[in-house]
Amino acid sequence: MDTADKINKYSQKIGYDIKVLGLAKTIDNDLAETDHCPGYGSAAKYIATSVLEAAKDAEIYQQNIITVIEVMGRNAGWLAAASALSKLSSKVGADLIYLPERIFCIDNFLKDVQKIYDKKGKVIVVVSEGIKDANGKYISELYSNTHKDVFGHSQLGGVGSVLGELIREKIEKRVKVIEFGILQRCAMHFASKTDIEESVIAGTTAVKCAIEGHSGYMVGFDRNYDEYGTYHCSTKLIPLSSAANAEKIFPAEWINEAGNNVTQEAINYIKPLIVGEVPIKTDCGLPVYAELKKYFIAKKL
Amino acid sequence: MDTADKINKYSQKIGYDIKVLGLAKTIDNDLAETDHCPGYGSAAKYIATSVLEAAKDAEIYQQNIITVIEVMGRNAGWLAAASALSKLSSKVGADLIYLPERIFCIDNFLKDVQKIYDKKGKVIVVVSEGIKDANGKYISELYSNTHKDVFGHSQLGGVGSVLGELIREKIEKRVKVIEFGILQRCAMHFASKTDIEESVIAGTTAVKCAIEGHSGYMVGFDRNYDEYGTYHCSTKLIPLSSAANAEKIFPAEWINEAGNNVTQEAINYIKPLIVGEVPIKTDCGLPVYAELKKYFIAKKL
């Protein structure tokens, strides 16, 4: 959005007639001024489903086991929070959820895990890659090296392994660590129908607005509930300058007091975004996804 | 199958009238005497799909990137081999595939990766967790510690990270490591219809055979092709003693000469097993899976 804003301002300055409209696409759901972002609903659905499946997997064994699942999210816990939905359709799912918006305390964490372990023998822990201790130090950095991506952001990862090792030492040797990695942003085979439909509306709105002569806006979403409590989504135009570089973190009041789960309000917010499945075209049993034609790439269109 | 065989023999010895039928269920596809195993087709479909999606993810970036994907398979490469199918519906997919049936040479591996990297800038590597060097030492053990599971098997994992680090040092800093972990055995949301249907047939056959008085057999599969080349699957009874403790590894002749991919014969073998999708029941956008009723668990039935 910052780049789009700069292009828009520069085009206006030099009198170049181009219309710049931004789309709030990010699975991180951390853009300001919009209720939610295209992409988030599908990633949330994949995460909640995979956490549910991992919990089912643990359930069938007699032995105790602790599963630690690491989810994307450098500064915002929206993706990790989505794992709370795993319990909507099942008795098993995420037992403990830790977001980067709350200071992570290893002692409290081990107490939380021990408590559920003593009760059930099986624990499903979901953790954002970006959780930090009271000194602002990434938990993943306490034990491992980090790489930087092209923007100079620390490339996180490994916090699941770090916590898994801690649990192995202190509580239970049988630990599984799962890192969803890029699968959570590219697993189109189980996308949310709501998300796909809203994404198409956002894109269509941007094109229509450009044709009508608007420029310098991001297409955002508003959320409404009708008299029956049914969720509806509408679009709105937000000045790019308001959306650029502002980060919408997960609301503090949607994290429970103990800092190890999210509240019902958070579940209510995410729930409508993951509804519905999209029939995908397959060939030989494999999804067929759109490919940019060589023609367009060659012409750099 | 070994346990089923023992129960059968002991029951006969003490004159206890119980019928013991085995089902060849394992995603590893490594049971002897059967063409393939229930579960394998769905895991193969998930792996091929996720490798395809990871390859699509890498494709959209301008920067070069090398993706290393670690797949289950201690001694048998059936699961890693399934990643070859990623290219059936797409131009991108697994470029290099390493199975435990072939000795893994780090120098050759780096040369393989470098060659594709020089040509395309992007490389998708798929590797079985159980690959070993010429001394029979697990590649994952060369750099990391291993844990043992309840059967005393080494709990592998980490070979993806080991190879990722090597690539970072020698070829390209931008490396993504993905470990599918238990997701490849529990991601029921994208199961193979063929696999599900065949599993039901196997189970039904076992019950029918027990009612007819058979005991001490595993229900296995035979594969046939009709005059149009269409795949058909039929069941057969295999003495438990033949199936027990025999491991069916991936055929040496289905690995290419360079040892870095599988042949067309391998693809032809796996291809029919992943065909078709199963509509799943959902609630709030999440899969609803069968749960054993408390009643049955309490009565230990």
Image (cartoon, coloured by chain):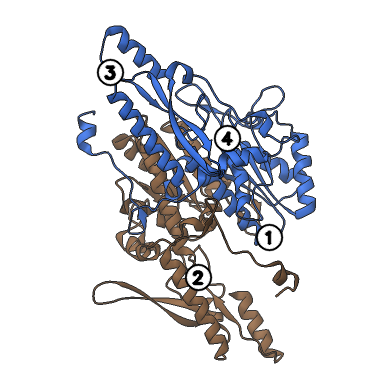
Chain colours: A brown, B blue
The crowding category of the residue bearing disc 1, from other C-alpha atoms within 10 Å (few below 14, some 14 to 19, many at least 20), is few
Q: Is residue B108 left or right of residue B50?
A: right
Front-lying residue, B281 or A259:
B281
Q: Which chain does tag 1 point to? A: A
Instruction: Write down the residue under mark 4.
Output: B78
Instruction: Write down the residue under mark 2.
Output: A31
Q: Which chain does tag 2 point to? A: A
Q: Position of residue B301 (x, y in %)?
A: 23, 29
Instruction: Write down the residue under mark 1.
Output: A150
Which residue is at 23% across, 39% downward? B293
- Dividing the picture into quadrants, the one containing residue B237 is top left
Q: Nearer the viewer, mark 1 or mark 4?
A: 4
Instruction: Name which of mark 2 and mark 1 comes first in the sequence.
Output: 2
- Dividing the picture into quadrants, the one containing residue B157 is top right
Which residue is at 47% across, 64% downward? A40
Structural distance between the alpha carbons of marks 3 and 2: 63 Å
